[in-house]
């Protein structure tokens, strides 16, 4: 018998109820609107990215309420800037006497774990049930976040928790690349990549803003308790309603299932049993181009993600409140611009204006060259605070194109091994996340100056330009021959590849 529960499941995921109801016309309209399960699945991936990125950055805000107040040497090269540090008052003095080095370690050791866990998690995402790996990733991050207040009084234990949290988070990007091959239709790929990865920006914004409010009203412990508990709701919904692949999905129309599994480059459930062609992978020119692009092309993103608030405080002399609002704004804009860019790239490719390879090279150019130029301008305009602020915000917005550029190229090259490829390429791609904060800390030990910051800016700019040159010369978005089993019939796939690329 058709129950209310059946109707709810049908409404959410587009299944077909077994009996007609008096509201059959309305139900048909609902099914027409909500029958695209692949869209709901992509939104769940977007939320998963929000969770992982949100739990990654909340400690950067919460630590303000965890440590005793300490003075640091800010720049005095622009006396016209109001020295807000002398006027600012706060009652957020915490219980822990951590040095600035220890505070930086609490934040950055996460990325050390992230790097260590990247390749193993990429391998697991490819070889095991991807749904289970993603559930473990989100659930582990939630639990480890909840126990942070319990461990904070013992610094080595806290560092271990943060390191292990980084390891468990490393599976996120490899999983997303694997699931893209399973759930996203080829003609919609760039758009949905933009939407899915918009979660990284939205998670950053929501985490920073909510952490500040919770910290002010409820204390630093509540930041971790609240942020760690909410993801459990996502885990329940994902566990019950969604499966690893459309072939196994319970709540889906046969029409949509057929559409997804017959799409170009679709990754089948049997792909996890395929032998990994290690020799072909490591002798592939497009793959090596991706490794270097991932390594160098992430410098700007991680530099601005980890160091922009510090630069705005110590050089541009913004107070904490203004700093937080300005820092959040580009990530909020990113959540809109990336899907729009992805849609534009899909539209151009579907109309035959450019190929998928050209689309990826356009995205890499956008993410690498304009932000590099902006950083050069910022380095040499001195005390022009308004212009510097606008260019910093624009740099993050434009640099966010990495998510529809090289960070989804693994799935372009080999959908059947996308997790492994992400694990390999993003291991060196994470290096900039923890060497840049350490480099800034070492350079600014005697105080913050324009000249010292220019060293880090130039390293970032050179890395970005090299990333673009490498990818535009050697990069590709064509599915590689080694994506298919050696014993399989690849003639049809290769023919379709030639037609589309």
Image: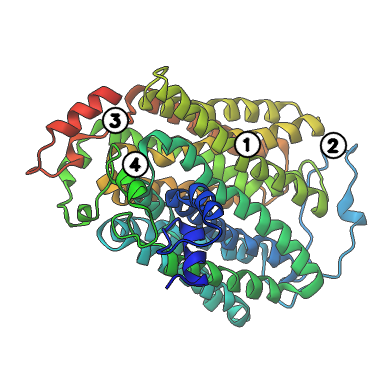
Number of other residues with Cα within 10 Å of mark 4, as a class: few under 14, some 14 to 19, many 20 or more: many
User: What quarter of the picture does the N terminus occupy?
Assistant: bottom left
At 29% from the left and 51% from the top, the residue drawn is: 420
> Which residue is under mark 2?
78
Across and down, in percent, residue 137 comes to 43, 65
At 75% from the left and 36% from the top, the residue drawn is: 389
- Closest to the observer: 500 or 387? 500
> Which residue is under mark 3?
478
Mark positioned earlier in the residue sequence (2 or 4)? 2
At 58% from the left and 80% from the top, the residue drawn is: 151
The alpha-carbon separation of the residues under discs 3 and 1 comes to: 27 Å
Would you say 492 lies left or right of 142 here?
left
Which residue is outermost to the front?
22
Mark positioned earlier in the residue sequence (2 or 1)? 2
Across and down, in percent, residue 158 comes to 55, 75
Residue 297 shows in this picture: no
> Which residue is under mark 4?
410
- Per the rendering, the mark at residue 397 is 1
The alpha-carbon separation of the residues under discs 2 and 4 comes to: 45 Å
């Amino acid at each position: 018998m058709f129950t209310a529960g059946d109707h709810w499941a049908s409404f959410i995921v587009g299944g077909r109820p077994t009996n007609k109801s008096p509201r059959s016309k309305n139900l048909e309209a609902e099914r027409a609107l909500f029958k695209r399960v692949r869209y709901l699945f992509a939104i769940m991936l977007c939320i998963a990215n929000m969770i992982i990125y949100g739990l990654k950055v909340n400690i950067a805000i919460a630590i303000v309420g965890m440590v005793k107040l300490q003075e640091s040497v800010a720049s005095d090269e622009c006396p016209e800037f109001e020295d807000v540090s002398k006027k600012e008052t706060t009652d957020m003095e915490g219980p822990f006497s951590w040095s600035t080095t220890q505070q930086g370690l609490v934040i950055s050791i996460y990325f050390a774990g992230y790097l260590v866990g990247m390749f193993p998690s990429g391998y697991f995402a490819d070889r095991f049930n991807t749904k289970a790996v993603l559930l473990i990733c989100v659930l582990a991050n939630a639990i480890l976040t909840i126990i942070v207040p319990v461990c904070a009084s013992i610094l080595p234990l806290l560092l271990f928790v943060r390191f292990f949290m980084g390891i468990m988070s490393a599976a996120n990007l490899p999983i997303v690349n694997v699931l893209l091959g399973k759930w996203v239709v080829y003609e919609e790929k760039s758009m949905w990549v933009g939407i899915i990865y918009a979660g990284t920006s939205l998670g950053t914004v929501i985490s920073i803003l909510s952490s500040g409010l919770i910290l002010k009203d409820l204390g630093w412990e509540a930041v971790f308790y609240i942020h760690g508990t909410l993801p459990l709701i996502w885990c329940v919904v994902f566990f019950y309603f969604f499966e690893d692949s459309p072939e196994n999905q319970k709540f889906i129309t046969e029409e949509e299932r057929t559409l997804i599994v017959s799409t170009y480059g679709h990754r089948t459930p049997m792909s996890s049993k395929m032998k990994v062609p290690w020799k072909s992978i490591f002798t592939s020119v497009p793959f090596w181009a991706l490794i270097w692009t991932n390594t160098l092309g992430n410098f700007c993103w991680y530099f601005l993600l980890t160091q922009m608030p510090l630069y705005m405080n110590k050089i541009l002399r913004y107070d904490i409140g203004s700093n937080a609002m300005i820092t959040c704004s580009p990530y909020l804009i990113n959540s809109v611009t990336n899907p729009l860019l992805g849609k534009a790239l899909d539209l151009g490719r579907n109309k035959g204006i450019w190929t998928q390879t050209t689309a990826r090279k356009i995205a890499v150019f956008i993410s690498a060259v304009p932000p590099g130029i902006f950083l050069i301008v910022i380095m040499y305009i001195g005390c022009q605070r308004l212009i510097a602020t606008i260019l910093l915000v624009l740099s993050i917005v434009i640099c966010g194109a990495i998510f529809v550029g090289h960070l989804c190229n693994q799935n372009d090259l080999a959908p059947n091994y996308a997790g492994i490829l992400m694990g390999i390429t993003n291991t060196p791609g994470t290096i900039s996340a923890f060497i840049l904060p350490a480099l800034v800390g070492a350079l600014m030990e005697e105080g913050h100056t324009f000249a010292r910051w220019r060293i880090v800016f130039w390293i970032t700019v050179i890395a970005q330009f090299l990333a673009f040159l490498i990818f535009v010369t050697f990069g590709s978005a064509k599915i590689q021959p080694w994506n298919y089993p050696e014993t399989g019939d690849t003639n049809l796939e290769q023919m379709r590849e030639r037609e589309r690329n």
